[in-house]
Image (cartoon, helix red, strand yellow):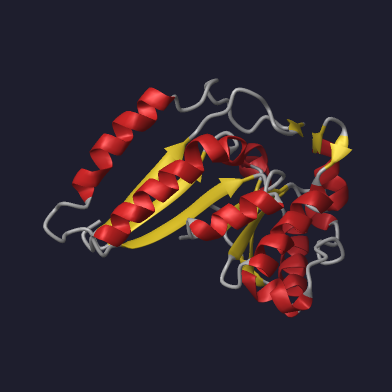
Amino acid sequence: NNDGTWHLTLKSYTKIVILDVGIVMKKHPKGYMQPETVKRNKSVWPLIFLKKGDTKTFVFLGFGGEPLLYFEKIIYPLSIFIKQLAEEHHVKFSNSITTNGFFLTGSVIEKCKTIDLKKIQITLDGDKESHDKIRNQGGKPSFDKILQNSIALCNSCSDAVIKLRINYNTDNIQHDLVSTCEIPENLRSRFFIQFQRIWQTYQNESNDEIVKRYLDENFFKLKKEGFICLLIQIIIIWW
């Protein structure tokens, strides 16, 4: 960017499906970033920091497939490498990932703190009941575990923030989302909630009055409970 900000989006595609998803959102190529690719990238990135002070901020985003599956092999070592470069050249470093949240374990959280990975986007498919019907781990529900992992991150890292992107359609938006988002009151101001219509239904339902009414109800209920709500219809880069 003209303000001296570099954005690097790393797509570390995975070979296996982490959660059984009832709705196929997008097909990704199989495989993941190989060591040779990692090595080539590491040879190029230092050049960004040598542009005579032009680089002010380096924004790193892990995305694609499930980045936490290869956290130890890809996300963590690359984050360490870029963070060191940023510190050596007095460049601000921002680190974030988009994940399903299932593998945000205690050991991962501890390493997240060492690489300044404090901004995480997690996707939920509606309320607990709707989510667990289509996203599960070997038939076991995932909603509660994802929320528990998110809460654990915020408890462990005082400046961590979570964006919960809630996918909705005509059916699941009619459920009460407040009752299923059991997040401690003192942490709610660090949870940004973004409603995102499931894209396959967008054209058919964009003017659905029922959807609008329940969307507004959930939006204002969550806001009243202390969550930060982002009522938008398109995907944005949050950080």
Residue 53: quadrant of the picture = bottom left
Quarter of the image that includes the C terminus: bottom left
Using the image, determine if residue 70 lies above or below residue 90: above
Residue closest to the eye, 30 or 35: 35
- At 70% across and 73% down in the image, what residue appears? 188
Q: Identify the residue at image location x=43%, y=39%.
A: 10
Percent position (x, y) of residue 145?
80, 50
Q: Measuring from the top left, give residue 34's x and y in whole percent.
A: 44, 24
Residue 211 point in image, percent of width and height: 74, 56
Residue at 29 percent of width and 53 percent of height? 85
How many numbered circles are shown?
0
Q: Is residue 188 above or below residue 86?
A: below
Point out the residue furthest to the left here. Answer: 52
Residue 26, visible in the rendered structure: yes
Residue lying furthest top:
30
Residue 6 or residue 152, whichever sits in front: 152
* Residue at point 78%, 55% (across, down): 173
51 displayed left or right of 161? left
Q: Quadrant of the N terminus?
A: bottom left
Q: From the viewer's perspective, is 208 left or right of 56?
A: right
What x and y, as percent, mark residue 126? 77, 51
145 displayed left or right of 96: right
Say whether residue 235 is visible: no
